[in-house]
Amino acid sequence: MNRMYDFSVDEALPKPERYRQLIDAAGALVDGERDGVANMANVAALMWDFLPDINWAGFYRVDPEGEGRELVLGPFAGKPACIRIPFGVGVCGTAAATGETQLIEDVEAFPGHIACDAASKSELVVPVQRDGRLIAVIDIDSPHLARFDREDAAGIEALAARICAAI
Ligand code: SME
């Protein structure tokens, strides 16, 4: 099937409205597709397209072989990244261990931060839960300090809730 997806981003819109558009586009892509890898890949591509000033966007999944205590790299956009992250290590591992969103203004000030790309300065990591269980985290990096705020966190949390059944 030859189908073009053209989700245009209106940079003039207020941030919450842009996140609503991102979430609608993600829903349109994942609804009706049962392959979780395909869905994560498309959501990573959408985040990359919709979010300005970022240098990495994607997923780490809870590895079912890791006794539920290890993250493994999933689909993403950006430079090749660290493959396995134990729970509790770095920003992603902290989000996984606590189940809480990590909004980090300066990654160098975060104890144990894992530098995959030296350009990354700030980071947002949001847990993805399904039926009350952590299944993945969404990780977004920026080359700018304090790139992410509460609106970004709320937007990506809403995205996680929208796609959690499809990944
Ligand atoms: N910086 C992350 C590791 C993943 S990369 O940024 C893609 C961390 O500290 O968990």
Image (spheres, rainbow, N blue to C red):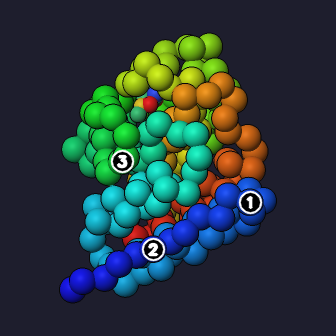
In the rendered image, residue 19, in percent from the top left (x then y), is placed at 65, 62
The residue depicted at 68 percent of the width and 48 percent of the height is 152
Residue tagged by mark 2?
6
Q: Nearer the viewer, mark 3 or mark 2?
A: 2
**C-alpha distance separating marks 3 and 2:** 19 Å
Mark 3 lies on a secondary structure that is strand
Identified by mark 1, the residue type is Ala
In the rendered image, residue 94, in percent from the top left (x then y), is placed at 52, 30
Residue tagged by mark 3?
76
Identified by mark 3, the residue type is Phe
Q: Specify whether residue 96 is in view.
A: no
Residue tagged by mark 1?
12
Label 2 beta carbon within 8 A of ligand 1: no
Looking at the image, tell me whether mark 2 or mark 1 is earlier in sequence order: 2
Residue 20 sits in which quadrant? bottom right
Label 3 beta carbon within 8 A of ligand 1: yes
As drawn, the label of residue 51 is none
**C-alpha distance separating marks 2 and 1:** 18 Å
